């Protein structure tokens, strides 16, 4: 069955989804949080609620590739500290999706994208603070901080698959270097995203139709991951993050005005 006919999408729209899937792979192995652009593309091409279910398996494919690439660099004490709060955030996000209709979800995703853009700017400033005062941020990262970031990350990842910038900010503020950052975030999102599958399926966001489209899109994640692995030590990350912020703002505004 033709997935484009099934979803009533044009060739250009499928190309946009394919590019978004490639960007997922790139973000998982190079610049965490860049997939907020993918979120905006999926929500613009597909119905807002349905887009979260279609995007989730694509993200999981990227998570698997990231874990295979950076599995030796994960910091498990940090992960165990975050998981209980994230679980609470996922439950809250699930309850929100039960109540919200497509228009509310679209508006919420747009608002979350704009919030994530602000979070990313803050994240970059926090990263500079860590470089200037090594250990000063880590010493203040306690249970309250982990719970706050965890709940917000769980909610945003359940509602809009947009927990990347929240968790990135937490990991950077905790003083993680590049490889430790990538390895810890890879395992974090693989575990969290897989745990979201039963919730999304129960809400009807993942079904045979969404998985058929996923099968056509997941192949584009692989080259994106290889490009990310190649570029991680070569990319001008500051410029790229500026582009990601701009694209995220445009996507968020588009969803709010749609």
Image (spheres, helix red, strand yellow):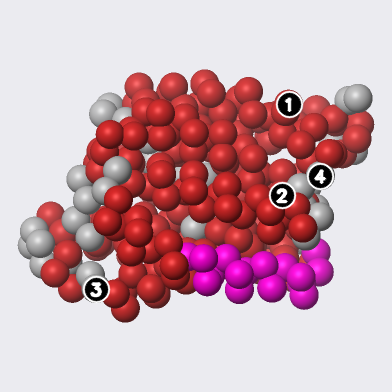
Characterize the local packing of mark 3: few (<14), some (14-19) or many (20 or more) Cα atoms within 10 angstroms.
Answer: few
Quadrant including the C terminus: bottom right
Assess whether mark 1 and mark 2 are in contact (beta carbons under 8 angstroms): no
The first of marks 4 and 1 along the sequence is: 4
- Which of these two is toward me, 178 or 15? 178
- Taking 137 as reference, is 192 above or below it? above
Q: Position of residue 108 (x, y in %)?
A: 66, 68
- Which of these two is toward me, 7 or 193? 193
Could you say whether the residue bearing mark 2 is in a helix, strand or loop? helix
Which residue lies under the disc numbered 3? 142
Quadrant including the N terminus: top right
- Which of these two is toward me, 154 or 116? 154
Horizontal side of residue 13 vs 237, given as left or right: right
**Quarter occupied by residue 67:** top left
Assess whether mark 1 and mark 4 are in contact (beta carbons under 8 angstroms): no
Which label sits in the foreground, 2 or 3? Answer: 3
- Taking 85 as reference, is 167 above or below it? above
Could you say whether the residue bearing mark 4 is in a helix, strand or loop? loop
Assess whether mark 4 and mark 2 are in contact (beta carbons under 8 angstroms): yes
Q: Residue at x 17, y 67 (%)?
A: 137
- Which numbered circle lies on residue 207? 4
Q: Residue at x 29, y 43 (%)?
A: 74
Which residue lies under the disc numbered 2? 53
Task: Report the Cα–Cα distance between label 1 and label 3.
Answer: 43 Å
Q: Point out the stretch of residues depicted in magenta.
A: 86-102
Assess whether mark 3 and mark 1 are in contact (beta carbons under 8 angstroms): no
From this viewpoint, which residue is outermost toward the bottom? 144
Q: Main secondary structure of the magenta part?
A: helix
């Amino acid at each position: 069955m033709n997935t484009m006919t099934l979803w009533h999408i044009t060739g250009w729209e499928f190309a946009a989804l394919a590019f978004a899937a490639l960007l997922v792979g790139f973000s998982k192995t190079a610049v965490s949080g860049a997939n907020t652009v993918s979120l905006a593309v999926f929500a613009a091409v597909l119905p807002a609620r349905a887009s979260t279910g279609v995007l989730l398996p694509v993200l999981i494919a990227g998570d698997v590739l990231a874990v295979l690439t950076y599995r030796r660099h994960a910091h498990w004490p940090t992960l165990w500290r975050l998981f209980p709060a994230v679980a609470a955030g996922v439950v809250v996000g699930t309850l929100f999706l039960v109540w919200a209709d497509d228009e509310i979800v679209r508006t919420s995703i747009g608002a979350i994208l704009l919030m994530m853009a602000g979070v990313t700017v803050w994240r970059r400033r926090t990263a500079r603070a860590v470089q200037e005062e090594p250990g000063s941020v880590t010493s203040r990262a306690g249970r309250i901080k982990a719970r706050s970031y965890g709940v917000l990350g769980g909610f945003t990842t359940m509602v809009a698959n947009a927990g990347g910038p929240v968790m990135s900010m937490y990991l950077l503020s905790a003083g993680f270097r590049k490889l430790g950052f990538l390895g810890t975030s890879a395992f974090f999102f693989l575990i969290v995203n897989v745990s979201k599958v039963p919730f999304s399926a129960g809400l009807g966001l993942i079904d045979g139709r969404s998985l058929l489209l996923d099968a056509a899109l997941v192949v584009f994640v692989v080259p994106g991951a290889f490009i990310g692995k190649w570029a991680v030590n070569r990319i001008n990350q500051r410029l790229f993050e500026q582009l990601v912020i701009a694209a995220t703002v445009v996507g968020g505004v588009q969803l709010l005005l749609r």
